[in-house]
């Protein structure tokens, strides 16, 4: 079950440096975890989760397999991208293919690195990218609305339902608000919105790229971005991308931790970004534990047990009978599956069970 987070931003903001650091981090993880780089601009990185090692130790598993998130390095955007300027069409197409956006903003001064707008102003840069995405979405919806207007004359019943989604989205975009600012509670309306593949409907996390001096504390630029993020109901991650690239090259864990300590950091910014991307997509993790492996699985929050079974194999979902489920804390307290069974902490859950983060599960099925 793949989830992709696109890394976007203006040219010369540190986007590629960040992606290269992510890729190096993933390569370093390869000693313990499966890793692959699909193309030069796509990297798959393990989601940090301390629970995996704990479960593997209790289950005496031969290996650990983490859940993963995919990061896509998307070509830099320039003003006019919505009209095809620069690599506009490629840029917009690549964003449509991801599930969420990590928007890299330059939050450092350096006279040796040219800024496309001639001055460092991260909030302005965020607005530039957002405006281009909104203009592209507006064009998409206006074309769709025009097509629906023709259909309405034929008495098509689906037109009315689609207009209940498109009209408020158009109003928001015309008012300078992204598509994600329009909430839909009705499942059918949510489905229609997803099928529109709007760029500004995707959740966003702002990545403040700072210099080494601001890696731990941030600076005036990051404070400006944080204020904007709070207003939008999203979050920020402060990262010194150039420093992270250096840290990623250190294979010795103790050496890496010592280097981070000199900067006042308890963990890498990349770990925080990976975790933030996972949360941004509203995902949870469930586990399977056995002698061969302990594996973490990615699942959307609120998903039912059969969908979780389908993440492992489609046949599991088709023939789902029930799920033997142990909460993570119960698994620890009872020292494993057998102890949980003996203590009555293993539950048999049916089709309507909403999987909780951290559940240790075993699926029974018949096909």
Image (spheres, helix red, strand yellow):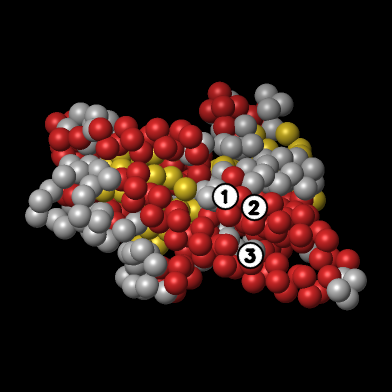
Task: State the residue lying farthest toward the left.
Answer: 112
The image position of residue 342, as x and y in percent, is 68, 27
Asked if 233 appears above or below 315 in the picture, the reply is above
Q: Nearer the viewer, mark 3 or mark 2?
A: 2
**Mark 2, residue position:** 171
Disc 1 and disc 2 in contact, CB within 8 angstroms: yes
**Mark 1, residue position:** 175
The image position of residue 267, as x and y in percent, is 29, 35
In-front residue for pair 249/77:
77
In-front residue for pair 267/15:
15
- How packed is label 1: few (under 14 Cα within 10 Å), some, or many (20 or more)? few
Q: In which quarter of the image is the C terminus?
A: bottom right
The residue at the point 44 percent across, 72 percent down is 83
The disc, 1 or 3, on the residue closer to the chain's N-terminal end is: 3
The image position of residue 207, as x and y in percent, is 35, 45
Q: Residue 141 carries which label?
A: 3
In-front residue for pair 248/99:
99
- How packed is label 2: few (under 14 Cα within 10 Å), some, or many (20 or more)? some
């Amino acid at each position: 079950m793949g989830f992709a987070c696109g890394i976007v931003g203006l040219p010369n903001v540190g986007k590629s440096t960040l992606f290269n650091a992510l890729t190096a981090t993933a390569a370093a993880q390869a000693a313990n975890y499966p890793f692959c780089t699909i193309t030069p601009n796509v990297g798959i990185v393990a989601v940090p989760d301390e629970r995996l090692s704990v479960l593997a130790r209790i289950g005496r598993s031969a290996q650990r397999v983490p859940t993963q998130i995919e990061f896509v390095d998307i070509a830099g955007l320039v003003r006019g991208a919505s009209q095809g300027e620069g690599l506009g069409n490629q840029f917009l197409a690549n964003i449509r293919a991801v599930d969420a956006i990590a928007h890299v903003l330059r939050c450092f001064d350096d006279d040796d690195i040219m800024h496309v707008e001639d001055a460092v102003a991260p909030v302005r840069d965020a607005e530039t990218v957002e405006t281009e995405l909104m203009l592209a979405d507006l064009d998409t919806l206006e074309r769709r609305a025009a097509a629906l207007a023709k259909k309405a004359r034929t008495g098509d019943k689906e037109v009315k339902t689609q207009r209940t989604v498109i009209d408020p989205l158009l109003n928001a975009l015309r008012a300078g608000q992204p598509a994600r600012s329009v909430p839909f509670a009705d499942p059918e309306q949510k489905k229609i919105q997803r099928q529109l593949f709007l760029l500004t409907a995707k959740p966003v996390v702002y990545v403040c790229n700072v210099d080494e001096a601001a890696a731990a504390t941030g600076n005036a630029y990051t404070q400006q971005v944080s204020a904007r993020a709070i207003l939008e109901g999203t979050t920020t991650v402060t990262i010194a991308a150039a420093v992270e690239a250096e840290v990623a090259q250190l294979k010795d864990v103790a050496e890496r931790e010592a280097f981070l300590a000199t900067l006042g950091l308890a963990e890498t910014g990349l770990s925080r970004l990976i975790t933030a991307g996972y949360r941004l997509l509203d995902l949870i993790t469930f586990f399977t534990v056995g002698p061969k492996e302990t594996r973490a699985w990615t699942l959307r929050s609120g998903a039912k047990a059969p969908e979780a079974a389908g993440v492992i194999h489609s046949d599991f979902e088709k023939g789902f009978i029930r799920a033997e489920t142990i909460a993570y804390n119960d698994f620890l307290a009872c020292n494993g599956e057998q102890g949980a069974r003996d203590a009555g902490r293993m539950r048999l859950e049916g089709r309507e069970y909403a999987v909780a983060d951290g559940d240790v599960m075993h699926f029974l099925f018949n096909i």
